[in-house]
Amino acid sequence: MNNMNQKNPAMDANQAENKTNSNAPANPTSTQNSLEIAELREGMVVMRDGSFRAVIACKSINFDLMSSREREGVEYSYQSFLNSLTFPIQILVRSQRVDIEPYLNKLADIQMAQDNMLLGDLMEDYINFIDSLSRSANIMDKSFFIVIPYHPTGDLNNLKDSAKGFFGKIFAKPSAQISKIDRNTWDKAREEIKKRVDSITGGLYQMGIKSVQLSTKELGELYYNVYNPDTAVYEPLGDFRDTASLFVRKAEGDNPNQGGF
């Protein structure tokens, strides 16, 4: 009887620890909180500070094969393009390793279906040559993008704040708070982003550069490749709308982890 009324110090310690853990705040330095991106919607990137971004993908032109007159025309067009801008832009050049495994698999399938033994042997030598070449030399693919920002508070004020607090933002702890955006701000940002995108694409077209604004899906693929450069080569991102669900339903049957830790 006395043993039943006696308190167990180990149990009390566990209860106190569980209570402390339940009241503990979420980890403020998680990977998700370190990202400045809050959401991708309607072809725009919504940042945590309430600003917006649009990304334009650009085709490259072979400047070396142009004549001197053509080069001068491109240079003058580029100069006029920069002078006509009334807002800041960011030019991004990204290099990514090319995965030639699908190409080699396609060649292997053609080789298996080849009836001519001589052509089959030649294709096998070609496959081995391409495979060894890709292993010895990194085959890179360059992509060109232009990032267009929009700040509801004004671009000039944002540049001043960024210049004042540059080092403070580097050494400051990541903020988990996300600025709230109302419908009027969203509509105005979407309209202003569209005007800026049209201005950029029109200026690039004068230089013979084709460009297009990235969609929401393409933005997700871009940021996935940027944050996962090695994984993206062998595991490309599929349709991310198929990887999420609006709700989660409890599975049928007993819980396999019941009675575990």
Image (cartoon, rainbow, N blue to C red):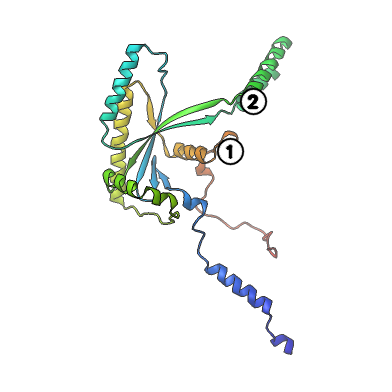
Badge 2, how many Cα within 10 Å: few under 14, some, many 20+? few
In front of the other: label 2 or label 1?
A: 2
Per the rendering, the mark at residue 169 is: none
Quadrant of the image for the C terminus? bottom right
Give percent across and percent down for residue 114.
69, 15
Q: Nearer the viewer, residue 15 or 249?
A: 15
Amino acid of disc 2? Arg
Residue 151 visible (yes or no): no
Q: Residue at point 30% right, 17% down?
A: 73
Q: Residue at point 37% right, 24% down?
A: 210
Return the residue found at the far bottom. 1
Per the rendering, the mark at residue 231 is: 1
Q: Secondary structure at mark 2?
A: helix
Q: Which residue is mark 2?
A: 135
Spatial separation of the CA atoms under disc 2 and disc 1: 17 Å
**Image-based side of 228 in relation to 181, left or right:** right
**Image-based side of 251 in relation to 239, left or right:** right
Count of numbered marks: 2
Q: Nearer the viewer, residue 206 or 137?
A: 137
Amino acid of disc 1? Thr
Give percent across and percent down for residue 144.
43, 29
Q: 125 above or below 157?
A: above
Q: 230 above or below 19?
A: above
Quadrant housing residue 21? bottom right
